[in-house]
Image (tube, coloured by chain):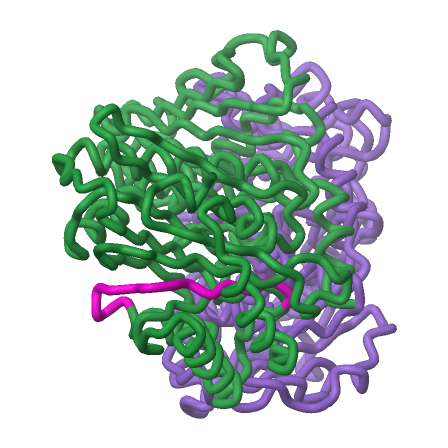
Chain colours: A purple, B green
Amino acid sequence: MTVTAAKGFSAAGIAAGIKESGGPDVALVVNTGPRRAAAGVFTSNRVKAAPVLWSQQVLKGGEVTAVVLNSGGANACTGPQGFQDTHATAEKAAEVLGCGAGEIAVASTGLIGILLPMDKLLPGVGRAAAELSEHGGEKAAIAIKTTDTVHKTAVVTSPAGWVVGGMAKGAGMLAPGLATMLVVLTTDADLDAGTLDKALRDATRQTFDRIDSDGCMSTNDTVLLLASGASEVAPEYGEFADAVREVCGELARQLIGDAEGASKDIRIEVVNAASEDDAVEVGRSIARNNLLKCAIHGEDPNWGRVLSAIGTTNAAYEPDRLAVAINGVWVCRDGSVGDDRDLVDMRFREVVITADLAAGAERAVIWTNDLTADYVHENSAYSS
Amino acid sequence: MTVTAAKGFSAAGIAAGIKESGGPDVALVVNTGPRRAAAGVFTSNRVKAAPVLWSQQVLKGGEVTAVVLNSGGANACTGPQGFQDTHATAEKAAEVLGCGAGEIAVASTGLIGILLPMDKLLPGVGRAAAELSEHGGEKAAIAIKTTDTVHKTAVVTSPAGWVVGGMAKGAGMLAPGLATMLVVLTTDADLDAGTLDKALRDATRQTFDRIDSDGCMSTNDTVLLLASGASEVAPEYGEFADAVREVCGELARQLIGDAEGASKDIRIEVVNAASEDDAVEVGRSIARNNLLKCAIHGEDPNWGRVLSAIGTTNAAYEPDRLAVAINGVWVCRDGSVGDDRDLVDMRFREVVITADLAAGAERAVIWTNDLTADYVHENSAYSS
């Protein structure tokens, strides 16, 4: 399923020996057509990994035949050699698939600042091509995991006969612009690259861009949408965009649910904002407040830290009209003490913080996680 | 010493019963003149505690006779009642000192969102006034501690016969604009309020504004500078400003050194920036990167996370010209792998990260701490 749920796609995931653990580390997703329209959204970090620079060029053509993905190394901050390695990876895939390297997107994830072992990666691409299957989506999703504890997939099927499916990896360094490491979406809807691009940007803006596990923006974020046209159905834009957004939303929720070391998933709803931009700005400020994230970890409904975070934004509001609910209990009203904080039940993994700006009618939802000793442990030992 | 190192000041610190621990929690600093010039800098958080709103008004007059400080409660997000309580505190101090309430600054620190126990605070102000002493600076510095493990003081003595001294509290929620909770500086130099204001703003911009322990901006930050004129010396501006900056710098360094749960103090030097603003923006981005802060905790010279943080800024630079040194070893050159990371010795508490933007000749230093399981523990249990 996953990237092979839609007709016109095959995939594979194999162990090429890049990871010291010997686990699966190379995935290949191939669009077998008839169309090869594609769109992509990439990290807004100005320090971009070699595969991001490469794939951005590929996507300009609006056609992608295949995506090569590897875990075990991000190929970021690796200089001219790193870019040559990405180019060689695309050439290798083009050779075994019988197409041009300019139709091959490449995505990498893992530690920054180390060159990939090309003597393992290139033969791995060949072996992955030999194992391509219409049922290979699951293996591909597994091969892109790094610190992920589970692989992430989602599928939406339209009654009209077309499908959008996808896979994602990401467990840390989740922050807006984008908010994930690697995502490949596929569809057998019959659409052109421009339509795919619009649907993908609309979807990521409201999903991956609104999860923020640790405020850290990756050098490698890549979200690709490939369309085979194999269903021979050309859906209405709105219907298709909804499906893409639904798949992205499900994957985003899975990413937050698997964030490194987290024990709580925190849904921050900012309501009654003067604009959607204000709501997003306030939500992100709350999501990035380490003191609040610690408090949520301790199941402490510390609304003062929510107000402190709101106070650092430029959004429209009056401090003495702010209200905050935690899991439905309005612990802060009119910028001051509200209902009894002992009424708040925080035993469950999901925690909902509602911030009412009393300044308009717009809203946005941002997801984040708590800050835990496990997060510190996992990320203080990552590269050693 | 501390706030009583300069002539013309008396101070006291007593236990009024606000803190459940029974420790000292009310401090009083009195300017006995002959002058009563004063300047203040306050949090840029839009959610401001009642004592901040009060003291901002007091400082507009340019004269302060006394400062009442309490730990054990921030009096933030406490609505109209909180403001009335601050007003009553100033009135009480004015009554016992025989001056107007408009000359009394008030500062509070502790948990947000709870009203102060006025039945304890007001008698405490009276008792503090009864214990005022020219040697009371140390007791005042101790009475403003919250999670601080040590009290923080600094003094600079001019050969010309005047002194600048000060005390600070703060161990968490340290972030620019300002970066500390409460600071009172005193001097016996004979200067007007305008000169004090300029010197204080120049100093805080380069000291308290450039420490960032956890990216969280307080509702209560207050830095006051009181001048008694008792030395009868009117120093040159430059000489006086240097002394104020030195005292602020020493206090800022002590705040970082005592940050909650920290095991490393991290000095981030951004060099060869196109502008000082660029250098500060890059330094703050690095200082707020949780993944990097975890890596430093693990003594892992993970320069990739430094580049990721630089990449999120709008500063002028070319990604392939960036260089990063950790404790003097240039582990990243030309945006890629540099010298052997195994050469980096990170055993000591102080870690120096140098980021070379290769874009100009400006520089700035930002201080932060590592992110530790102890920080999580301390801040997940703070209010309960």
Q: Does residue A144 show up magenta in the picture?
A: no
Quick one: quadrant of the N terminus of chain A?
A: bottom right
Q: Nearer the viewer, residue A141 or B362?
A: B362
Task: For residue A6, say whether it is visible.
Answer: no
Q: Looking at the image, which residue is at 54% across and 52% down? A: B140
Q: Is residue A309 visible?
A: yes
* Position of residue A125 measured from the top left corner of the image (x, y, whole percent): 70, 29
Q: Would residue A13 appear left or right of A280 to someone viewing this image?
A: right
Left or right position of A87 against B380:
left
Foreground residue, A59 or A370? A370
Q: In this view, does A228 lie to the left or right of A2?
A: left
Q: Position of residue A180 (x, y in %)?
A: 61, 52
Residue B54 sits in quarter = bottom left
User: Viewed as shown, does residue A192 lie left or right of A216?
Assistant: left
Q: Which stretch appears magenta? A: B59-72
Vertical position of residue A59 compared to residue B240: above or below: below
Pinpoint residue B220: horizontal percent, then vertical percent.
Answer: 48, 65
Can you give x and y, in whole percent of width and height, for residue B128 in the image?
55, 63
Residue at figure coordinates x 48%, y 29% from the top left: B267
Which residue is at a point 56% across and 77% down the rendered structure image? B122
Q: Quadrant of the C terminus of chain A?
A: top right
Q: Which residue is drawn at 82% across and 75% down?
A: A346
